[in-house]
Image (cartoon, rainbow, N blue to C red):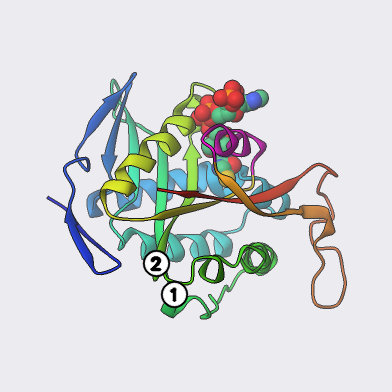
Amino acid sequence: MAEAKCDNIQMKDDMYGQREWKSFIFKPAEPENYRDILEHMRTSFYRDEPLNYLTGYSEEKAKDMDTMIMEYFQDGLSHIVLEKETNQIAGARIIAIHKRENADTPRVMESAEMKKIWPFLHQLDEDSNIFKLYPDMDSYVELFMASVDRRFRGQGLATEMYESAIPFLKSRGFRLVKSCFTSPFTQRIGKNLGFRELSRRYFRDYRDESGEVVFTNADDKDEAVVGALEL
Ligand SMILES: CC(C)(COP(=O)(O)OP(=O)(O)OC[C@H]1O[C@@H](n2cnc3c(N)ncnc32)[C@H](O)[C@@H]1OP(=O)(O)O)[C@@H](O)C(=O)NCCC(=O)NCCS
């Protein structure tokens, strides 16, 4: 049975097993799944998530993303979703723990695409300033990446991924869950689940250090919203 540490509480979690939902199986991401999940992310999230879509795909970017996800797997909270009948990956839910002591350590990105995306997300985090909002909280959890294979979209799978993560994370002793919603579809999910908006930015307004618009191909309505939910 998995164990997680949070704010010095160690909890056993009996919700962390395999379970079925409609024609899918939800299960914890185990080391033997990591390669398949990263492969799934390459055909789904790294191409279709709005900021990834706007900046395009490269192998260098995929490596940056893979490194980040491999690190978050170590937190032991991520999930994989399999189609029951075929055992194919239908989706993945990457969950990360953020600690106050690491809040100011910048992540170094190598690829041109992530050098555009990451500072934008970092700005949204700075706007949200979670550790200042919750001065007595030493860590919080982030619903970081939600990815559903193109073949399985529009059936409520992402909604279920967000919804089921909430009692699971609560049972693990977390007090706050945050998510950065960069897709209009996940923004709907966050709103429906009662996430409180902490910050919001339009992609097209974002400029780099020299004042140049970064996401030149963004639509006027494309935006990212950071939301938080107290558990
Ligand atoms: C975003 C993504 C995870 C959504 O997955 P999904 O399983 O199709 O989402 P759901 O079926 O649970 O739908 C969520 C909401 O979006 C709406 N929605 C989903 N697809 C839609 C579409 N093509 N057009 C209009 N609305 C849509 C649903 O109606 C639902 O809203 P509602 O409950 O108010 O009706 C999926 O499209 C994906 O993997 N995209 C690439 C990666 C990405 O963008 N991840 C999210 C980054 S924050």
Q: Could you tell me what secondary structure mostly forms the magenta stretch? A: helix
Q: Which mark is residue 192?
A: none
Q: Earlier in the sequence, mark 2 or mark 1?
A: 1
Q: Is residue 170 magenta?
A: no
Q: CA distance from mark 2 to mark 1?
A: 6 Å
Residue type indicated by callout 1: Arg
The reply to whether the C-beta atoms of the residues labelled 2 and 1 are less than 8 Å apart is yes
Residue 150 can be seen, yes or no: no
Residue lying farthest left?
1
Ligand 1 in which quarter: top right
Q: Residues within 10 Å of mark 1 (few under 14, many from 20)?
A: some
**Residue 115: x and y, percent?**
66, 69
Q: Residues within 10 Å of mark 2 (few under 14, many from 20)?
A: many
Q: Secondary structure at mark 2?
A: strand
Q: Which residue is the site of mark 1?
A: 100
Q: Is residue 130 left or right of residue 201?
A: left
Q: Residue at x 67, y 46 (%)?
A: 50
Image location (x, y in percent) of residue 199:
67, 56
Q: Nearer the viewer, residue 123 or 217?
A: 123
How many tags in the picture? Answer: 2
Q: Residue at x 48, y 43 (%)?
A: 146
Give the answer, above or below, for where 149 lies relative to 64: above
Q: Nearer the viewer, residue 2 or 59?
A: 2
| Residue 213 showing in the rendered view | yes
The boundaries of the magenta stretch are 183-194
Q: Amino acid at mark 2?
A: Ser
Residue bearing mark 2: 139
Q: Residue at x 26, y 47 (%)?
A: 171
